[in-house]
């Protein structure tokens, strides 16, 4: 490709992931409880008009809330599991990439110099770039693209080597196999930088939360009781939303994948 | 006559402020303010910070694939080390530096200028890099168009002075001519029968033109001269020519991988360093990794810097480089120059109080000096080249150099030696370039 690699622009609202997890959880909680309480003051009197003269209104509202809660709870649960799975998969890809890199480093260390030395340098260069430059970009939701240049440089040097003995042929074939594993894991890591729930799913979740709270406003009970009981429900919804949001982007926020596998590898590469 | 929507207020009439409008406007303003301020309020991140804290982008223009990659990657690493040092010390004018390293893929004529253009378009405030003279010459028009400075770290042939370039490497009067003087000296064996050998491109052709004029001024003619294409590997004929010429030394401007084949053929031809020493101008520590020690031991290389330069500053730099990039990495002359040029740019920006090219250039023309690992590096305000010391190293078995000769101090740069380019002068303090008679370089490339 004959173009200058450009890092993709960070997504809007990426800054929310920069907030420490504790503060972000409080923010979600405050937003949900605050929304519910404000609704109690301003919207509840209007909504109550719909059920005001219905006999057993609280029972009906309670039944609707239970039904709705089951479906919404299922949705939230499944989404939370998906988000967690996403983080776990991305973490596995990072570990797989570092492991392939480590195996590749071992393989090329047995190549005759200067090939062996050049290939080791290039792998070290790649690892250093991932730790020092690619990871901070990933944490902002930007796909780092200069790593591709480094991987290309390694591939070029690797393919330039002509095995002279049967032993070198076997070693070279193994190195090429490891290189393909490495490339695959690397691509998976890059793909997972922007992986996350689609916008439509967020809209459904938020709409569901609003409807949940709106149903609570229909209950006929003491104002203070409504504030407390509904507030508890709103707080829990906020906590669930926070959990899903924080796990949604595998490389962002406090609950994110670190570059530790690469750091361990780089330390070992530099110790030899 | 403009058309109006039905019921829309006619141009010039003041719209009535209704409660709905006030509420809409208020909500929109609140949301916009929240969107703008929230990042800063909650995280203190850059989205809400003034531009004064945003990183300053620097463009590093080095091939990372292709034939030049192995040499250029090391130079890029030296520049990255300098940038990281600067960032660790607080950045430049309170702003951190950010490096952009695209890959010109060793394609000097087309991809180097293209990448330079892309870097400038992406906001690089200065460019560092290039390797071959072809790439440098191709990038200069881009620098002129975007008003950027190129900091070029390589030794080169001279015969050029652009106000858009700061030349950090040696020119012939700082590298090749002192090497010739040393060959004439008793320490060098009072050798007079010099064979000129080079790759066939602009640097060897121009450098050897200067050497020939220099020799003729001393009533000496080279005993032979040969040029071979870059990447050439058949040197048996050349070795026979050297043998037949009864040369007592070879001045080599062979570049790249051809050195492997040349030294191999030389050893196979029974010519050793005792009999006919080769003084190379393009073989450094990085290139020695590819050469068999038994073929090159005892031969010489002319540079301004060697990894084996004594002194605490150099030892510390070499250690730091190895700590960051690997225990078996080596440092070389172009790497040292590249590292020093980044620090020189920083010094100039701080002196100017701005990253604007004109201000930086003006600051550089004050004759700024930085402490490079191999000694002080000072900009000559007249030529925008650097005053540098000359060192001659003898190749050891461990692919390092014993320094056998060193100039008394830094040598002032002369990109237009009058002996070869009569009438040509450069003084950017007074009118710039003064052209002399046209000089034809054989095999002009």
Image (spheres, rainbow, N blue to C red):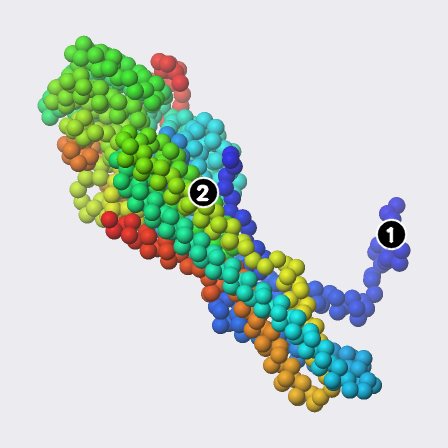
**Marks 1 & 2 on one chain:** no
Residue A218, disc: none
Q: Nearer the viewer, residue B400 or A84?
A: A84
Asked if one can make out residue A53 in the rendered structure from this viewpoint, the answer is: yes
B240 up-or-down from A132: above or below: above
Q: Are marks 1 and 2 in contact (CB under 8 Å)?
A: no
Seen at 77% across and 82% down, the residue is A48
Secondary structure of the residue carrying numbered label 2: helix
In the shown orientation, is residue B389 left or right of residue A61?
left
Q: B403 or B395: nearer the eye?
A: B395
- Tell me where residue B349 appears, x and y as whole percent: 40, 46
Label 1: state its secondary structure.
loop
Q: Residue A189 versus residue A75: which sits nearer the camera?
A: A75
Query: Which residue matches tag 1?
Result: B4
Would residue B264 appear left or right of A105 to someone viewing this image? left
Q: Residues within 10 Å of mark 1 (few under 14, many from 20)?
A: few
Q: Which residue is mark 2?
A: A148
Real-space Cα separation, disc 1 to disc 2, in angstroms: 56 Å
How crowded is the residue under tag 2: few (<14 C-alpha within 10 Å), some, or many (20+)? some
Quadrant of res A227: bottom right
Please count the marks in the image.
2
């Amino acid at each position: 490709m004959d173009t200058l690699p450009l890092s993709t622009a960070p997504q809007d609202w990426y800054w929310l992931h920069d907030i420490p997890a504790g503060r972000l959880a409080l923010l979600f909680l405050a937003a949900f409880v605050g929304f519910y309480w404000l609704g109690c003051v301003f919207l509840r009197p209007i909504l109550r008009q719909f059920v005001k003269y219905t006999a057993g209104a609280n029972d009906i509202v309670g039944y609707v809330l239970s039904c709705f809660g089951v479906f919404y709870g299922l949705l939230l649960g499944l989404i939370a599991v998906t988000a967690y799975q996403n983080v776990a998969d991305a973490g596995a890809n990072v570990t797989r990439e570092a492991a392939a890199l480590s195996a590749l480093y071992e393989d090329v260390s047995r190549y005759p110099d200067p090939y062996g030395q050049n290939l080791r340098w290039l792998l070290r260069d790649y690892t250093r770039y991932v730790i020092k430059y690619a990871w901070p970009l990933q944490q902002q939701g930007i796909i780092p693209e200069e790593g591709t240049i480094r991987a290309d440089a390694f591939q070029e040097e690797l393919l330039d080597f002509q095995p002279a003995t049967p032993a070198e042929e076997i070693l070279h074939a193994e190195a090429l196999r490891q290189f393909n594993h490495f490339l695959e894991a690397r691509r998976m890591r890059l793909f997972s930088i922007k992986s996350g729930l689609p916008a439509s799913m967020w809209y459904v979740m938020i709409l569901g939360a609003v409807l949940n709270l709106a149903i609570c406003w229909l209950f006929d009970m003491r104002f203070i009781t409504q504030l407390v009981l509904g507030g508890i429900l709103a707080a829990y919804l906020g906590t669930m939303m926070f959990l899903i949001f924080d796990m949604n982007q595998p490389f962002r926020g406090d609950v994110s994948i670190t570059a530790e596998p690469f750091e361990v590898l780089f330390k070992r590469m530099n110790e030899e | 006559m403009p058309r109006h929507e039905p019921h829309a207020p006619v141009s010039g009439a003041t719209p009535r402020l209704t409660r709905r409008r006030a509420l809409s406007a208020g909500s929109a303003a609140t949301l916009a303010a929240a969107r703008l301020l929230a990042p800063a309020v909650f995280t203190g991140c850059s989205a809400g910070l003034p531009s004064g804290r945003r990183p300053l982008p620097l463009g590093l223009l080095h091939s990372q694939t292709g034939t030049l990659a192995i040499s250029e990657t090391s130079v890029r690493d030296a520049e990255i080390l300098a940038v990281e040092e600067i960032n660790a010390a607080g950045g430049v004018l309170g702003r951190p530096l950010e490096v952009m390293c695209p890959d010109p893929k060793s394609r000097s004529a087309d991809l180097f200028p293209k990448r330079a253009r892309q870097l400038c378009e992406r906001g690089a405030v200065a460019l560092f890099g290039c390797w071959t003279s072809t790439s440098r010459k191709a990038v200069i028009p881009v620098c002129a168009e975007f008003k950027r400075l190129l900091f070029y770290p390589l030794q080169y042939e001279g015969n050029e002075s652009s106000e858009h370039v700061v030349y950090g490497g040696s020119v012939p009067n700082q590298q090749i001519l002192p090497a010739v003087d040393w060959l004439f000296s008793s320490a060098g064996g009072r050798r007079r029968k010099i064979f000129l050998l080079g790759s066939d491109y602009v640097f060897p052709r121009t450098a050897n033109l200067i050497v020939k004029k220099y020799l003729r001024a001393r009533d000496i003619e080279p005993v032979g001269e040969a040029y071979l294409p870059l990447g050439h590997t058949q040197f048996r004929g050349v070795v026979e020519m050297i043998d037949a010429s009864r040369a007592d030394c070879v001045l080599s401007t062979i570049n790249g991988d051809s050195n492997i084949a040349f030294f191999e053929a030389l050893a196979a031809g029974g010519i050793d360093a005792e009999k006919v020493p080769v003084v190379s101008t393009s073989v450094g520590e990085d290139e020695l990794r590819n050469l068999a020690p038994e073929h090159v031991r005892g031969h010489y290389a002319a540079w301004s810097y060697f990894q084996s330069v004594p002194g605490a500053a150099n030892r510390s730099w070499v250690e730091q480089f190895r700590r960051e990039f690997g225990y078996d990495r080596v440092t070389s002359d172009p790497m040292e120059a590249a590292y020093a040029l980044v620090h020189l740019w920083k010094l100039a920006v701080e002196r100017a109080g701005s990253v604007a090219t004109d201000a930086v250039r003006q600051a550089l023309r004050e004759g700024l000096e930085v402490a490079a690992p191999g000694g002080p590096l000072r900009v000559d305000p007249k030529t925008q080249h650097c005053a540098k010391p000359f060192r001659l190293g003898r190749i050891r078995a461990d692919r390092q150099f014993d320094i056998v000769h060193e100039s008394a101090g830094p040598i002032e740069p002369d990109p237009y030696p009058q002996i070869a380019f009569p009438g040509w002068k450069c003084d950017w303090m007074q009118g710039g370039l003064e052209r002399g008679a046209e000089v034809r370089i054989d095999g002009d490339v």
